[in-house]
Amino acid sequence: MTMKKVVLAYSGGLDTSCAVRWLGERYGVEVVCFSAFLGEARSPSVLRKRAFAGGASRIYIEDLKDEFAHDFILPALWAHARYEGKYPLATALGRPLIAKHLVRIAQKEKADAVSHGCSGKGNDQVRIEVGVRTLDPSLKIVAPLREWEFQSREEEMDYAKVNKIPVEATKKSPYSIDQNIWGVSIEAGILENPWNEPPEEAYRITRSPSRAPRTSKYLNLDFQNGVPVRLNGVKMSLVELIEKITSLAGQYGIGRMDQMENRLVGIKSRELYEAPAAEVLLLAHAELEGLVMDREFIHYKRVLSEKYAELVYYGLWFSPLKEALDSFFKSNQKRVTGKVRIKLTPGKAICVGKSSPYSLYSEKLATYTAEDQFDRTAAEGFMKIWGLPYEGMKGGKKL
């Protein structure tokens, strides 16, 4: 593989910090680093120091939180996307955005190739590489973790030490962590044994429910055309609102998930997730949508939501089917306008109120009080028509 310049998707973690040096040694290429800020707490100065310590010639550090919130999180919120019914896809949503800008910078730098620090048995390699190949198939792709000689994170730590590359991972704290504004993914270390209870030290943004405040807290959310725009009466940008809910709900231990997950490559993986804002907003949006949309739409959407989550998880963000489903989920968001009240309790968010000018709910039809206006006499005819296809189907046998 002949290359002169490679753009590396650089997180500043153990894998990519080692990859900068390794790429230069193995291929003799100029390495340009690209770091995307999607909400993780990282210092630009620390990233620069680590990248240059590894031998990078240049580093791009870009804050993409706003684009991430509006162009990736919001469509997933409208889709009610959860992989296998639990994981709200925080990491999976970030990868196609990284792939998009990785290609942009590679084109700007006139690079021959791009590279990443994704595991050879993980999902992220698929999300990055399928995204790159979809957007610019002329770029070569180098995946150090599929090629290099290191068999463990411990060996990588030794390599970093020998090459004087500063990294945060230690043999006592070997967790692999990915964080953005939609959530945190945590794996490796003691978590690899599914019998082990996750230690509190593994969590990053949530407090244990046992240490949560005993007094419940209420969040009042205003939605406009499907977009959450106010929290407790205060207008906020989408990024600000997500970050604020993360802080508030995280104090109650909301959004913790311990999931035995079926990876795309065919293996099972034990993953810890923290997603306080995702848990609250997915609940609030679903409750409001349930108030304003009809039964057939809601029931069919559940089928499409599962497929949408699979497409995102499988790295098919730029695929025609995923884009078509985006259009479907977006089509009725104008009706998802109103207010939702969420009650935060230790470990759980509960919807306790909702209202909308587009509400399909009629108290006069639903009530069992003297105000009831439902025509009960019409029910008899409905029963006859509804049950007609099944009448006598079992032959009238004595039971």
Image (cartoon, rainbow, N blue to C red):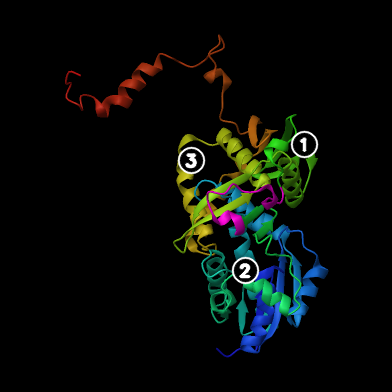
Quick one: SS at disc 2?
A: helix
Binning the other alpha carbons within 10 Å of mark 1 as few (below 14), some (14 to 19) or many (20 upward) gives few
Q: Which residues are magenta?
A: 188-205
Residue 218 at what x, y percent from top left? 73, 32
Of 285 and 269, the residue lying toward us: 269
Question: Disc 1 designates what residue?
Answer: 232
Query: Which amino acid is tagged 1?
Result: Asn
Q: Is residue 293 visible?
A: yes
Q: Was residue 204 drawn as part of the magenta stretch in this picture?
A: yes
Q: Which of the two marks, 2 or 1, is nearer to us in this view? A: 2
- How far separated are the C-alphas under marks 1 and 3? 30 Å
Question: Disc 3 designates what residue?
Answer: 297
The answer to whether residue 110 is left or right of residue 396 is right
Quick one: SS at disc 3?
A: helix
- How far separated are the C-alphas under marks 3 and 2? 47 Å
- State the mark number for residue 153: 2
Residue 392 at what x, y percent from top left? 20, 24
- Residue positioned 25% across, 28% down in the render: 390
Of 207 and 383, the residue lying toward us: 207
Residue 30 at what x, y percent from top left? 69, 86
Residue 143 sits above or below residue 375 on the image: below
Quick one: SS at disc 1?
A: loop
Query: Which amino acid is tagged 3?
Result: Phe
- Residue positioned 45% across, 43% down in the render: 300
Q: Is residue 81 visible?
A: no
Of 379 and 138, the residue lying toward us: 138
Q: Was residue 22 drawn as part of the magenta stretch in this picture?
A: no
Mark before the other along the chain sequence, 3 or 2? 2
- Which quadrant would residue 233 be assigned to in this image? top right
Q: Which of the two marks, 3 or 2, is nearer to us in this view? A: 2
